[in-house]
Amino acid sequence: MAFEELKAGIAMLMDEIAKRPEDAHVLQEQLREKISELKALGLPVPEDILALELALEDKPEGEG
């Protein structure tokens, strides 16, 4: 999968997390998978994506 396709997929996940904060824990796992794909391809992971992942990890489950 090309870098631009992965970035588009991540952007869609970010939108879904914003729209459905109650499902953030499920969407966070999908985000991790996309980040892993970027790393596996040796591609850079944008700082805002890493920051979002950290923010989601720090947020207690069920908190919106």
Image (spheres, rainbow, N blue to C red):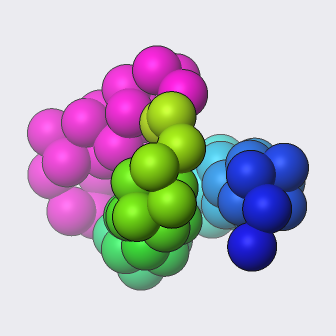
Above or below — where is 17 with respect to 34?
A: above
Q: Relative to 11, say whether 48 is above or below.
A: above
Secondary structure predominantly adopted by residues drawn in magenta: helix
User: So how many labels did they put on this image?
Assistant: 0
Residue 57 is inside the magenta segment: yes
Which one is in front, 32 or 52?
A: 32
Tell me what residue is drawn at x 46 percent, y 20 percent: 47
Q: Residue furthest top?
A: 47
Query: Is residue 48 shown in magenta?
Result: yes
- Residue appearing at x 19%, y 48% in the figure: 57
Where in the figure is residue 5, as x and y percent of width and height? 83, 61
Q: Is residue 36 something one can see in this rendering?
A: yes
Image quadrant where residue 26 sits: bottom left
Quadrant of the drawing holding the N terminus:
bottom right
Residue range of the region highlighted in magenta in the rendering = 46-64
Residue situated in front as seen by the camera: 51 or 7: 7
